[in-house]
Image (cartoon, helix red, strand yellow):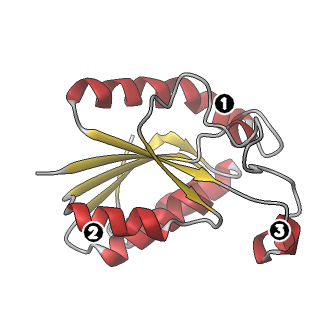
Amino acid sequence: MRKLFVVVDMQNDFVFGSLGSGEARAIAPKVRALVEQWRASGEEIVFTRDTHGEDYFSTQEGEKLPVAHCKKGTEGWQIIDGLHRGERVFDKPVFGSEELCAYVRAGDYKEVTMIGVCTDICVLSNAVLIKTACPSSVVKVLANACAGSSPAAHEAALRVLASIQVEIFD
C-alpha cells in the first residue's frame, strides 16, 4: 500500500515569526522526530509551503488576515531548520494545494498522514481537498504534531476533520 506523509507549512513565520505561537514551537521537536521516523521507514515525505508575493494584501486572504507572512524568498517563508532535506515541496498561495491533491490522486496513495500548522486552516484545507478528490484514500491527522491558530481552533478543526472521516491520532 502506497503511503504519503505530508508536512504542512512548518515555516519560520508560522513557528517563530509573525504568525508563530507557543503551540507551534512546542510541536516542532515532535514534527522533527516524526519526519526522521518516516525517513527511516522509507515512506515518501512531501512538504507544503505557504507562499505569498508582493500582492498579498490585495488578495482575499490578505484583506482578511492583514499580517505579512511567508513572502517568497524571505527567511519567514523557509521551512524550519533541520526539517526539509530535499523532499518535494508544494508551494501554495492559498490554504489548500490543488497540486498536492493531484499528486496524491496520480500517485494512487492509499494512506495520507498529515502534520503541521495551522490545524484549523491549512491542515484542514488540505485534508478536505485530499479526502474529497481521493475518497478511497485513508487520510490521517496526528493531532499532537499539529498546532492551530489557537488551542480552541485546533480542537474544533479536529472535530470537523473527524466528522468527515479523517482519522485523528495522537
Position of 168 relative to 130 (above/below): above
> Spatial distance from mark 1 to mark 2, Cα to Cα?
32 Å
Q: In this view, does 156 lie to the left or right of 164?
A: right
Q: Is residue 102 left or right of residue 123?
A: left
- Neighbour class for label 3 at 10 Å: few (<14), some, many (≥20)? some
Tag 3: amino acid: Gly
Position of 112 relative to 30 (above/below): below
Q: Which residue is drawn at 84% across and 68% down?
A: 55
Q: Is residue 163 left or right of residue 149?
A: left
Q: Is mark 3 on a helix, strand or loop?
A: helix
> Spatial distance from mark 2 to mark 3, Cα to Cα?
30 Å
Where, by quadrant of the figure, is residue 133 drawn?
A: bottom left
Q: Which is nearer the N-term, disc 1 or disc 2?
A: 1
Q: Which residue is drawn at 25% across and 75% down?
A: 135
Q: How many marks?
A: 3
Where, by quadrant of the figure, is residue 101 drawn?
A: bottom left
Tag 1: amino acid: Arg
Mark whose residue sits in front, 1 or 3: 3
Q: Residue at x 61, y 36 (%)?
A: 79
Residue 139: x percent and y percent? 31, 59
Q: Which is nearer the N-term, disc 1 or disc 3?
A: 1
> Spatial distance from mark 1 to mark 3, Cα to Cα?
24 Å
Q: Mark 3 points at which residue?
A: 62
Q: Which mark is residue 25?
A: 1
**Quick one: quadrant of the C terminus?**
top left
Residue 140: x percent and y percent? 33, 54
Q: Which mark is residue 105?
A: 2
- Neighbour class for label 2 at 10 Å: few (<14), some, many (≥20)? some
Q: Is residue 103 left or right of residue 71?
A: left
